[in-house]
Image (tube, rainbow, N blue to C red):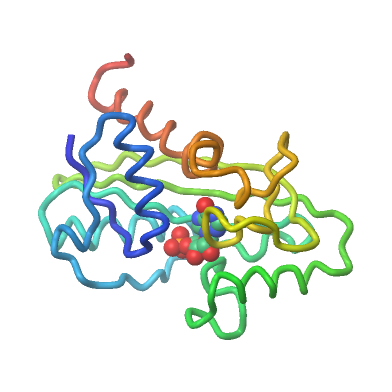
C-alpha cells in the first residue's frame, strides 16, 4: 500500500519511512508527491494537527496521506510544551532544536521531578474521507544537560525509561523500536488491519 507522508520535516520523514517500509508500506514524502506547502498547525490537540496536515495533502493529491503530530509533555510543567513543542521558545518557529531544548532545561532548573513523555498522534486519511488514527507514547526523564548527537529535536535531553542513555545516544535502530512514533505506527498498523477487515 502506498502512503504519502504529510510532513516537510526531514528527520521525521526519515523515521516514518524507516518504520513503515519495514512494515511493508511504500512511502513517499509530500514534497516527492509535489506538495510544496506548509500547513498551519492551528489545532489545539496533536490529533487535530495530524488531521489538518493529512487533509491538506489528500486534498492536493487525491491520494491517501499519513501525518504525525508529536510533542513533549513534561509533568513538572503541567504538560508543556505539548502542542507547542516545535515552537517552544519566544522565537517560535525561528528557534533551532538546540534553542528549544536549552529553553526547556532552563525552565526546569528548579525541578527535581524530571518525568516526561513524548507523544505522537498519527492520522491516516483516505480520499473517501475515512480515517485510521492512533496514538503512541514513550515515557522517560528530562536530563540536566544534553548528551548525544543522534536523533533530532529534544532527543539529547530525553532518557527513555529502562535505558541509561538519552534518545540521542541510543541510535536509530533502538529509537525506531521504542519511540512514541514507533508505538503510534504499530498501533496504526493494527487499526489499519481492522479497518481492512483482517485482524492478522
Ligand atoms: P510537529 O509534530 O511537527 O509539531 O513537531 C513537534 C516537535 O517535537 C519537533 O519540532 C521536535 O522538536 C519535537 N519532536 C517530535 N518528535 C521528536 C522526536 O522523536 N524526538 C525529539 N523531538 C521530537
Residue 30 drawn above or below residue 28: below
Q: Residue furthest bottom?
A: 91
| Quarter that holds the C terminus | top left
Q: Is residue 76 above or below residue 23?
A: below
Q: Quadrant of the N terminus?
A: top left
Name the outermost residue toward the left: 62
In terms of depth relative to the viewer, which is nearer, 1 or 199? 1
* Residue lying farthest to the top in this orientation: 200
Residue 138 screen position, x and y as percent: 61, 42
Residue 193 position in % (x across, y down): 30, 24
Residue 32 location, quadrant: bottom left
Q: Position of residue 153 (x, y in %)?
A: 55, 62
Give the residue displayed 69% in from the left and 75% down from the top.
103
**Foreground: 120 or 164?**
164
Q: Residue 83: x, y in percent?
A: 54, 64
Residue in the image at 60% along x and 52% along y: 168
Q: How many marks?
A: 0
In the image: residue 96, left or right of residue 35: right
Would residue 60 be found to the left or right of residue 7 on screen? left
Quarter-of-image position of residue 105 = bottom right
Q: Residue at x 72, y 34 (%)?
A: 162
Residue 159, above or below 104 = above
Residue 56 in which image quadrant: bottom left
Tell whether 191 sits left or right of 173: left
Q: Residue at x 40, y 60 (%)?
A: 49
Q: Is residue 34 left or right of residue 90?
A: left
Amino acid at each position: 500500500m502506498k502512503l504519502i507522508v504529510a510532513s516537510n520535516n526531514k528527520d521525521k520523514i526519515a523515521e516514518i519511512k524507516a518504520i513503515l517500509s519495514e512494515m511493508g508500506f511504500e512511502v513517499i514524502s509530500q514534497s516527492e508527491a509535489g506538495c510544496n506547502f506548509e500547513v498551519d498547525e492551528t489545532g489545539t490537540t496533536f490529533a487535530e494537527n495530524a488531521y489538518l496536515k493529512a487533509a491538506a495533502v489528500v486534498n492536493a493529491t487525491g491520494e491517501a496521506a499519513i501525518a504525525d503530530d508529536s510533542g513533549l509533555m513534561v509533568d513538572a510543567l503541567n504538560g508543556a510544551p505539548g502542542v507547542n513543542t516545535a515552537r517552544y521558545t519566544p522565537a517560535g518557529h525561528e528557534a533551532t532544536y538546540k534553542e528549544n531544548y536549552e529553553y526547556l532545561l532552563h525552565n526546569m532548573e528548579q525541578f527535581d521531578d524530571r518525568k516526561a513523555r513524548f507523544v505522537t498522534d498519527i492520522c491516516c486519511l483516505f480520499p473517501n474521507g475515512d480515517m485510521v488514527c492512533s496514538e503512541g507514547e514513550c515515557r522517560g526523564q528530562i536530563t540536566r544537560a544534553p548528551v548525544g548527537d543522534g536523533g533530532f529535536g529534544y532527543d539529547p535531553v530525553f532518557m527513555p525509561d529502562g535505558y541509561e542513555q538519552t534518545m540521542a545516544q541510543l541510535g536509530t535502530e533502538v529509537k525506531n523500536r521504542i519511540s512514541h512514533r514507533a508505538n503510534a505506527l504499530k498501533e496504526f498498523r493494527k487499526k489499519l488491519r481492522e479497518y481492512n477487515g483482517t485482524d492478522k
